[in-house]
């Protein structure tokens, strides 16, 4: 039997259903944030970033990502992307109270989104060789240290929403690697201790107010204003929504940041319950295709990387939707492909492109060629 070459499988490596679901979600976000004016800056900029993201996707889909299996490459990429986080604390531009952006005038760049991908790479590499030893708590501690450094640097900006995503990526990959119940209990205990430490020494006053307002809603004109307006927007959508462009909470600016942090609420107001089901179904398709790609991963590294991307997307969806529905305290985070913003869109399309590139040499594609690749030292 003649083995299938890498070149021969490149054309079929793109999962068009996965990419299509992402593009439909991006289109829904565009429609929701549009004010239907002749010159809408949010619509035009978002459209431009979607085009840039698609270019990044197709470029990444053609790359042979097996070089990431090498320990030096993964560790070097991790260390390299820590530098912008350190520099942000010193010279970053404060937007909405957080130093999370480098402002270049015509555009602002948020490196935290790409740091999340670097964490997925380094954890996938670490667990790909050690997942059978997950019963040894040392591996949980070491992997946790990788995530903790990023978590602290992001939390100090302060960007607690992204810090939670970083924690979720680490926890998701640890669970995928076979974490025991005793270790899970220990991690939850450490999480409670860490939260207590952040409450005493890390959180700003406004962040504490948001959490207290979530626990005991009262100040709907102050700290609880955003959460209150979000739940009003979601509830007013009812079954079929108010109609595209007729969301009063968003278009009349009662709902703040409706293009980014509260776009799910703005979408629910205009599209209603039926629209929300459609949107969540599209995310379901995206997650299903990622699970399918992970099951066909060429090695443990590819499988864990794709599962890490799934954890990355799922954490954003759950956190963003939970905040918009009023079941989680407001932290300020985007929802994949729908929210306005270039940095997160570019990172998300890049992540999907990397998944497509890895699918080109999956187990199903050409198992004989994979045996030669492993013998050639890619997985060292």
Image: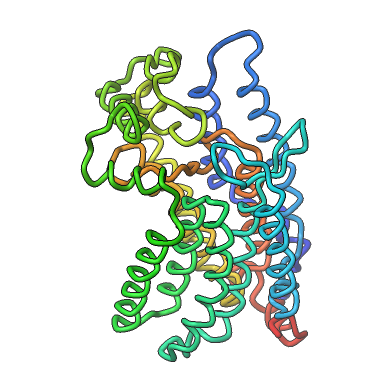
Residue at image coords 41%, 43%: 206
The quadrant of the picture occupied by the N terminus is: bottom right
Q: Is residue 250 left or right of residue 101?
A: left
Report which quarter residue 36 is drawn in: top right
Residue 277 makes an appearance in the image? no
Residue at image coords 51%, 40%: 21
Report which quarter residue 50 is drawn in: top right
The front one of 348 and 287 is: 348
Query: What sort of colour scheme is used for the picture?
Result: rainbow
* Percent x, y of residue 240: 30, 21
Residue 267 makes an appearance in the image? yes
Residue at image coords 37%, 41%: 321
The front one of 161 and 201 is: 201
Q: Can you name the residue that lies furthest to the top here?
A: 38
* Percent x, y of residue 226: 37, 31
Q: Is residue 193 left or right of residue 163?
A: left
* Percent x, y of residue 93: 67, 42
The quadrant of the picture occupied by the C terminus is: bottom right
The front one of 358 and 334 is: 334
In the image, is residue 359 above or below residue 369?
above
Q: Is residue 199 left or right of residue 73?
A: left
Badge count: 0
Report which quarter residue 256 is drawn in: top left
Residue at image coords 47%, 70%: 173
The front one of 121 and 99 is: 99
* Percent x, y of residue 56: 73, 46
């Amino acid at each position: 039997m003649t083995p299938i070459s890498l070149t021969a499988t490149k054309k079929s490596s793109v999962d068009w259903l996965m990419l299509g679901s992402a593009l439909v979600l991006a289109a829904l976000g565009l429609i929701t944030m549009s004010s239907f004016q002749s010159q809408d800056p949010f619509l035009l900029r978002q459209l431009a970033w979607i085009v840039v993201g698609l270019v990044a996707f197709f470029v990444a889909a053609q790359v042979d990502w097996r070089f990431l299996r090498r320990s030096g490459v993964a560790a070097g990429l991790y260390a390299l992307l820590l530098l912008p986080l350190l520099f942000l604390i010193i010279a970053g531009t404060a937007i909405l109270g957080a130093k999370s952006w480098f402002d270049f005038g015509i555009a602002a760049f948020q490196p935290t989104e790409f740091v999340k991908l670097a964490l997925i790479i380094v954890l996938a590499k670490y667990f790909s060789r050690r997942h059978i030893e997950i019963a040894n708590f040392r591996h949980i501690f070491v992997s946790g240290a990788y995530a903790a450094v990023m978590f602290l640097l992001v939390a100090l900006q302060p960007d607690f929403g992204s810090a939670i995503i970083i924690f979720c990526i680490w926890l998701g990959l640890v669970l995928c690697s076979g974490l025991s119940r005793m270790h899970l209990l220990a991690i939850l205990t450490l999480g409670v201790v860490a939260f207590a430490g952040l409450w005493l020494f890390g959180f700003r006053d406004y962040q504490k107010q948001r959490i207290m307002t979530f626990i005991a809603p009262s100040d709907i004109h102050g700290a609880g204003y955003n959460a209150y307006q979000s739940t009003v927007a979601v509830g007013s959508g009812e079954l079929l929504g108010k109609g595209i462009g007729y969301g009063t909470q968003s278009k009349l600016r009662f709902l703040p940041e409706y293009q980014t942090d509260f776009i799910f609420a703005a979408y629910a107001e205009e599209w209603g319950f039926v629209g929300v089901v459609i949107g969540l179904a599209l995310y379901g398709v995206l997650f299903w295709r990622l699970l399918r790609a992970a099951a066909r991963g060429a090695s443990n590294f590819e499988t864990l990387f794709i599962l890490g991307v799934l954890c990355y997307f799922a954490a954003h969806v759950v956190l963003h939707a939970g905040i918009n529905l009023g079941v989680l305290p407001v932290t300020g985070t985007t929802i994949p492909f729908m929210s306005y913003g270039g940095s997160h869109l570019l990172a998300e399309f890049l992540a999907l492109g990397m998944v497509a590139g890895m699918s080109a040499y999956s187990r199903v594609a050409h198992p004989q060629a994979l045996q030669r690749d492993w013998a050639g030292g890619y997985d060292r």
